[in-house]
Image: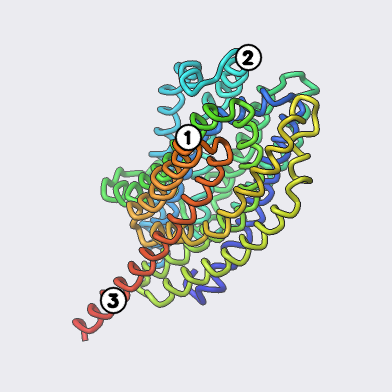
Amino acid sequence: MLGDPKKAVLKLSGPMIVGMLVQSLYNIVDGIWVAGLGSDALAAVGLFFPVFMVILSLASGLGVGGSSAISRKVGARDKEMADSAAAHTLVVGLLIGISLSGLTFPFLREIFSWIGAEGRIVHLVVGYARVLVGGAVVLVFSNIAGGILRGEGDTRRAMHAMILGAGLNMVLDPIFIYKLKMEVVGAAWATLTSVCVTSALMIFWLFVRRNTYVDIKFSSFKFDGKMVREILRVGIPSSFAQLSMSLAMFILNIMIVKVGGTDGIAVLTSAWRILMLGMVPLHGIAMGVTAVTGAAYGAKNIDKLNVGYLYGIKAGFAVELAIATLVFILAPQLSHLFTYSKGAAHISGDLIDALRWLVWFVPGVPFGRLTSAMFQGIGRGENALAVTILRTVVMQASFCYLFGIWLGFGILGIWWGIVLGNLTAAAVSFAWGRLTVQKLRLQSGLLGYQRA
């Protein structure tokens, strides 16, 4: 992470892109198996998605906070504090995981009824949710352990864990859903089982084999409030940033149910799976940018920080533009993956339209997403949070309401709102990121001048 920033971004991003591609492929396959149960099952999974995002956002946000802290300690060549950061991240994460299950599990039916689920769909989504909410502590641990590996630059083993989990999930899905006749609940059990296996592998690496850079020993653990604050300064805003995406999905679901019913939810859920697969390379690049900018910031090398940040954006834009073009062209074929069954065939045309509109916000995402990654790398989690809230809650939700409901364009207006909201926020975020790097360079130059 301390060498050529361009090579470092590529080296760290490559394994994560591969791992996340396989993981996102699982999401597609999972959706295909669920689609065989009909549009009600797809809608149930879509309604649970915002709740699932709450769990994952808290878990991955804390993982990002720990990863950022570890990478800065690596850049400063302070192994003892890197070990401390890893241990504190795990302790806080386990407490959060236990709390999530206890606070959410009793109110699942009320949550989904409030969103607008009715009849059979309520039964389906509650059954699905109970499995994953009950296993929240395992989901949290898996994300945090992956963040620790990424923070020390070991993205290869993080990739192996992701591939194992996703591959196992794809094998278990048809067994649990159809062979064991568990239907949509079987998809949840397949997910939780695969995460348990992945977590067991990470426990082996971190606590049994102990051949990672960080050395976690709870026997000598001493609570360090300053370290916790450093982790949470990035972790909490990162979690809230992802929670804002969950809030945005809640808002979108409410608006879509209003203008397009539960079929609209099924369309958005299916389209979103495809678009998330298309943005996997970007998320991998973002992890590389966070690690590289964090190490450069820890080493007080702002030039390397700037090169890594801009290189990530250029690479991300080129990749996402190519992916957007392919999705636009192949929309009918991609739509068929989720509408092959008799129960879901009637949403095929709407799904094609959704894909061909929504895909055009994808090329603009790198400018905001990688700016957030840079902010996380330098320990300014509050800036990363502001960037995400601007995109999801402020711009996206506002534009969707404007076009979809206020101006009466219906479901098509929702798609327009998502595109325009994301592109507007990306432009503002990138301008803020460039200004921040310029200020860091000026501060670094002033400090060097004063020392001389």
Q: Position of residue 122 (x, y in %)?
A: 57, 17
The answer to which of marks 2 and 1 sits earlier in the sequence is: 2
Q: Secondary structure at mark 3?
A: helix
Q: Amino acid at mark 3?
A: Ser
**Residue plotted at (41% across, 45% down):** 241
Q: Nearer the viewer, mark 2 or mark 3?
A: 2
Badge 2: how crowded within 10 Å, few (<14), some, or many (20+)? few
The answer to which of marks 2 and 3 sits earlier in the sequence is: 2
Decide which of 196, 136 is in the foreground and name it: 136
Check disc 1 and report the residue beneath it. 405
Check disc 2 and report the residue beneath it. 120
Check disc 3 and report the residue beneath it. 444
Visual colour scheme: rainbow
Q: Nearer the viewer, mark 2 or mark 1?
A: 1
Quick check: can you spot residue 424? yes
Looking at the image, do the residues carrying marks 2 and 3 touch, with CB atoms under 8 Å apart? no
Q: Secondary structure at mark 2?
A: helix
Q: Secondary structure at mark 1?
A: helix
Q: Amino acid at mark 1?
A: Ile
**Residue plotted at (38% across, 65% down):** 433
Q: CA distance from mark 2 to mark 3?
A: 61 Å
